Structures are given as C-alpha cells and as structure tokens.
Amino acid sequence: MNLVRAELERLSARRFVQLMVVLLVLAFAVTAATTLAGSHKPSVSELNSARQQATEARQSMEATFRECLARQGGALPTEDGGMYLPADCSEIDPVLQDRLPIAADFLPGVFTFAEQAEPLLYFLIAFLVLFGFLVGASYIGADLTSGGVVNLLLWRPRRVTVLAAKLGTLLGTVLVLALLASVAYLATFWVIGQAAGLPGRLDGDFWRSLGAVHGRGLVLVLLASALGFAIATLGRHTSAALGAFAAYAVVWELGARLVLEIVDAQKSDLFMLSSHIGAWLNGGARFYDERLCTGSAGRNCDAFYTITWEASLLVLLVLAGGLTAAAFAVFRRRDLI
C-alpha cells in the first residue's frame, strides 16, 4: 500500500501530467464555449417549420421507396427519369434506415444534445487515448532515464512488484480521471442543450447507446495507457513510445496501406490497427472492397466485409497484453544502470 501511495504521489507531481490535465480542461472549455456561442434556443416558429420539413422529408423517402417497388414489379417503366433507384429497394426502405429525418436536422445553429452527444463523446475518447498513451510513456520513461527506478528498487528490491505498482497506479489514475472528465464533459453539454439548445429525445435507447460507446472508450483508453507504458519500458525512454507511434503511423498506416492498394490486396483494412480501433468503438465496422467482386459474373456480388468488435478487441488485447508482458520480462532481467 505504501508503494502504491508513493507512486500516486510521484505521478500526480509530474509536471507533464499536470500540463496534460490543464490541456484537457482547456480543450473541454474551448469546445463548450464554441458550442454555446454557436447555439440558441429555437423559437416556436422555428420548431414548427423544422417539424414540417422533417415530415416532408420522411414522406419523400416513403414515396421514393414505393416508386422503387413499383418499378421493380414492372408497374412503372424502368427508366428512372434522372432519379437513382437501387436494384435492391431495401436499401432505401425507411423502416430499415438507421435513423429518419427529425426536426433537429432542420434547425441550423441549434445544439441538440441527443444528436451531438455521441460525436462529442468520440472527441473526448480520442483526447483521453492520447492523454493515456503520453502519460503512460512519460511516467515510466522519465523514471528509467533519470535513475528514479534504481532509487526506488533500493527501497523495495522487487522489480516485478515495483513495475506492477507503477502500471496499476497509472491505469487506476487514468481510469478515475477519465470517469470524472466524462461526467463533467457530458453534464456540461447537457446543460447547454437545456439552456441554449434542445435536449432531444433522451430515452433508454439513447443512454444505452451512449453508455456502450463510453464503456468501450474507457477500455481503449486503458489499453493505450498500458501500450505507452510498455513501449517506453522496452525502449527505456519516453521518446521510444513516441517514435514507435510515429513510425507505425507513417510506415504502416500510410506506407503499407499504399503498397497493399498497389498490389490489389483484398481486405487490406483487416491489417490496419485503426480499422480495429474503429470497429471496437462502434461495435463493428463494415468496409467496401471492389476487389472482392473481381472476376465475378454475378451482378449481385457483395463487395462489403465486416470486422466484428470481438475480433477487434482480441487484436487490441493481444497487442497491448503482449507488449506489456514483454516489458515485464525485459525489466526483470535487464541492467538498469
């Protein structure tokens, strides 16, 4: 317990951590201020006009769907008269759409919490992932560079215990900070929606969807923190984690993706970490690859493929867990001086 308390004091006293917390608060404040300045409480006439436009948009979708069914059944000529109609009318079936037009879609300059909460939460998760990665890397990297780990081992000469205490303190602190930041962040925008916008439809489905995204985001934040910690431990310096991140982004996400495009590799997104991150956060992801239909004589070839959240989580766990296990194995045997 004394070791964890000491590590918590060391982590909170680091200037880089304090700077990142200040930047986190500053980013939140700028986002909230910008949203507040760009929103207003809609008048009764604006709401009525928006509802009318939403109703007309839904009616137009239904009319287009009925026309597609009529042409597919031969009741109308096959010429579309300039209007695109898919071969499979279910693609434009209003009942099967993710969402239908609502009044908020026709209220420019009005912040609607129910519509904007999830995109705003993705922004928060992205910042917290960066926060966790950088803090995790600098926390252990600075101690290894300055000799702080050696001094700590003189007091507690158990390498695995010391490193585990550091990692556990890091993950616990980042989790608590992420939870507090999430509550403050979403509460701020909820108040903005009530005072200078619209709350929207805040039913059970909305909160369940938002909670699922938030939970998956917290897992990603913790994995990023452990990843930064592990890479910095292996490289014995904070810059090792930063260099590894930059090298992966340039060499693989950009360079390898370009090479895979040139050689006409199928399902190239399966090999990209960014694809698995997106699939995990969204509960799955669907990608289009026209190469899947190369040489296919059928007109109804399906050029889409899916990455499930289970597969993506496994990839992320293997990557973060493998590097963390390697960091512990190397730290246990390596000369620290």
Image: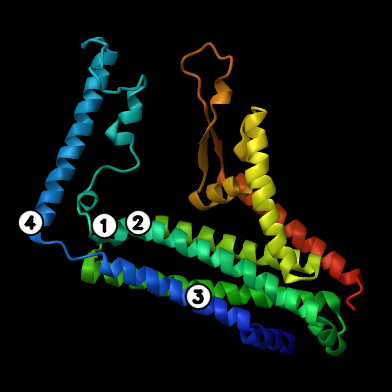
Q: Which residue is drawn at 66% across and 34% down?
A: 260
Question: Which numbered tag is attached to residue 201?
Answer: 1
Q: Distance between the residues labelled 2 and 1?
A: 8 Å
Disc 1 element: loop
Q: Residue at x 12, y 56 (%)?
A: 46
Task: Tell me which numbered mark, 4 or 3, is placed earlier along the sequence.
Answer: 3
Image quadrant in which you'd find residue 232: bottom right
Circles 2 and 1 in contact, beta carbons < 8 Å: yes
State left or right for residue 161 relative to residue 334.
left
Q: How far apart are marks 1 and 3 (CA)?
A: 32 Å
Circles 1 and 3 in contact, beta carbons < 8 Å: no
Q: Mark 3 points at which residue?
A: 23
The quadrant of the image that shows the C terminus is bottom right
Task: Tell me which numbered mark, 4 or 1, is placed earlier along the sequence.
Answer: 4
- Using a 10 Å C-alpha cutoff, classify the residue at mark 2 as few (fewer than 14 neighbours), some (14 to 19) or many (20 or more): some
Q: How far apart are marks 4 and 3 (CA)?
A: 41 Å
Q: Count of labels shown?
A: 4
Q: Name the residue under label 2.
A: 206
Q: Nearer the viewer, mark 4 or mark 3?
A: 3
Between 123 and 159, the residue placed more toward the observer is 123
- Tag 2: amino acid: Phe
- Tag 4: amino acid: Ser
Q: Mark 4 points at which residue?
A: 45
Between 47 and 336, the residue placed more toward the observer is 336
Q: Which of marks 4 and 2 is in front?
A: 4
